[in-house]
Amino acid sequence: MQAILLSRHPLNNLSLPPMAKSDGKMVGLLMAWILGTRAFFYYYVPYFDPFLLLHHLDSSWLRENLWESVYYLHAQPPLFNLILGGLLKATPLGSESMVFTIFFLLLAVRIGVMAYSLLRCFNISPRAAIIVSALFLLIPQERWLNYNIYFVSFLMLAATLSLYRYFRSAKMLPLFIFGLASASIVWSRSFFHLVFWLVPLIGLILWTKKKRSFVVIMMGVLLLGALPYVKNNVEFGFFGGSSWLGMNMANMTRYVKEEAIQKSIESGEVTPLIQIEHFAPVKVYQNYYGLESKTGIEVLDAQEKSNGTVNANHSIYLRASEEYKRNTLALIKKYPGAYTKAVFNEFYIIMGFIPYKFFDTYPDWHINQITSNAQLNKAIGIVDAFVLVGFMLSWKRTYA
C-alpha cells in the first residue's frame, strides 16, 4: 500500500538519479574546490569578528553567562547566539578567530555539497550540477556573512533535501530532520516569522492527506518554533522573534520628503522620534525619553559591548522600536507612493544587485552591506547572475 501511495505522489516526477561513482568524484572535486578557493581568498580577505555585528551579544556575556544572556535576548532569535556562545565556551582564550573560521568553513563545505545534491535531485547532470555549485561557492561570502544568514542558508538546504527524501522514502528520519531544520530557521532568523511559516506547513499537511506522523512532526515544528515568541511575549510584551521590527520598518519611510515628515510631526500624526536615525546609541534614546532604565540584567542594561559597539539588546530599544513602528505605519498610510518606492528598492537589493541603488535617496549603509569593496560587490552580482542562468539552461536541457 505504501508503495502504491508513493508511486502516485507528485514528487515521483523528480527522481533522484542513482548515485554513481561519478557523483562521489564530483562531490570530492567540489569540496577540494571550496577548500582551495578559501585558501586563496582567506589570505586576502581578513577575518571579520562576528561580535562587531549588532546581531550578536558581547562575547564575554556569552562565554561567562550564556543561558541568562540568551534568555534575555530580544533583539534576535536565540539559536545563533547560543551556537556562538557554545563555541566560545569550548574555545581557549585567544583561539576564537581560528575556531570561528573553521566553523564557517565547514558550513561552506556542507552548503556546497547540499547544493550539488539538490541539483541532482532535479535530474541536473553531474557536470552541470558541479559547475553551478562551484560558481555558487566561488566567493567566500562566509568570510563577511558570519552571522545567522549563512547559517540559515545551510538550514534551508537541509530542510529542502530532507523533505524531498521523506516524500521519496516515507522514512521518519528525513521528516524529523526537516522538522528540526524548519524550527531552527525560526529560531535563527526573525524574517521567517512563525505566522508566515504556518502557510507552507499547512499546505504540506494537506498535500500529504493528513498522514498522522507528518501532522505530529509539523505540530512539533510549530510548537518548538513558538517557544522564543512565547518567551518574548511574557518577558517583553511582543509576539515575535526580534524587537527590531519597528526600527527595521523605519527604512520604509526613506522616500518621504523631510518637509512632509515635519508637517506630520507638527500635526501630531508622528512623533519627533522619526527624525532620529534608527539604531542610534542608547544615550540618544535615553535623552529622548528622559529616563535611564535599569533592570539589573547586563544584556539589557549595558550601553555598549566590550568591543565598543552598541548593545542593540538594551531594554530602551524595546520602547523605541514600538514607537518607530507606529510612526512608520502612519507615514505609509499617508504616503503610499513613497512606501512603494522603498519596497521596490528593498526587492532590488535582496535579489543580489548589491552594488547599485534603484533610487538615489536610499541610505548608504544598504549599498555595501556585504562588503565595502565595490569591485568585489560587482563580482558577486555577476557570479550570482551567472549561476542563475546556468541553472536555467541546465534545467531546460534536462526537461526539453
Image: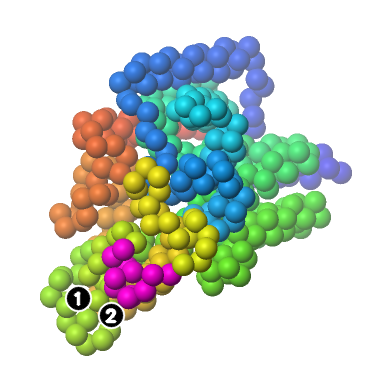
Q: Please state if 150 lies on the left or on the right of 87 as rendered.
A: left
242 sits left or right of 209 in the view: left
Residue 380 located within the stretch drawn in magenta:
no
| Dot 2 or dot 1, earlier in sequence | 1
Residue 177: x %, y % from top left: 69, 41
Which segment is the magenta one? 283-293
Answer whether labels 2 and 1 touch (C-beta < 8 Å).
Answer: yes
- Kindly identify which residue carries mark 2: 270
- Look at the numbered disc 2 and give the secondary structure of its residue: loop
Question: 371 or 46, which is in the foreground?
Answer: 46
Residue occupied by mark 1: 261
Few, some or many residues within 10 Å of mark 2 (<14, 14–19, 20+): many
Residue in the picture at 54% in, 72% down: 237
Residue 367 falls left or right of residue 78: left
* Image x and y of residue 159, in percent: 61, 42
Q: Residue 146, percent across and down?
A: 43, 37
- Asked whether 160 or 263 is in front, the reply is 263
Residue type at tag 2: Val
